[in-house]
Image (cartoon, grey):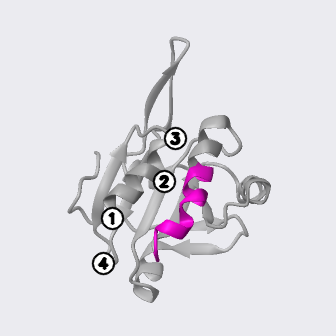
Amino acid sequence: MPLKPGDKAPDFTLLDQRGEPFSLRRALRQRRARHLLFFYSKADTPGCTAQACGLRDVAADIGDTVVLGLSPDTPAKQAKFDEKNGLGFLLLSDSDHAVAEAYGAWGEKSMYGKKYMGIVRSAFLVDGKGVVAEAWYKVSPKDTAANLLKAL
């Protein structure tokens, strides 16, 4: 079920690209900053690279907003993606896509007439209290950063 503004953001703990656990609840308690969670399907693919690099490029314009990328990729693959593109934010491994499902970012997709389950490119702005401030589903890679800037 899709999340909408005003909903409580589902908590999670996932490994980042360094193999360290990241907990949304703990991060919000320690630092009452906004968090942008963006779900992407696969590191180092053209669309996902454009999306992540777009967010990297607006980092100086988003204040204390914390950017988090989530995908089914392993921490090692995400570390290579981060190093190659100099992203500078955490990439989290949602290997069983449980977090994507909780956020409504996992669903049926179609390519060349074949249906399969996968990441629905989505982004969520979570306020410092853990409430969804904005939810963007089926967002284009280039619009993720623009939507964030507009919301701030």
- Sequence-first disc among 3 and 2: 2
Residue at the spot of label 2: 38
Q: Quadrant of the C terminus?
A: bottom left
Residue at the spot of label 3: 141
- Sequence-first disc among 2 and 1: 1
Spatial CA distance of label 3 from label 2 is: 10 Å
| Marks 1 and 3 in Cβ contact (< 8 Å) | no
Nearer-the-camera pick, 101 or 139: 139
Q: Quadrant of the N terminus?
A: top left
Amino acid type shown at disc 3: Pro
Spatial CA distance of label 1 from label 3 is: 22 Å
Q: Position of residue 129 (x, y in %)?
A: 30, 78
Amino acid type shown at disc 1: Ala
Amino acid type shown at disc 4: Lys
Q: Residues within 10 Å of mark 3 (few under 14, many from 20)?
A: many
- Considering the numbered disc 3 on the image, is that residue within a helix, a strand or a loop? loop
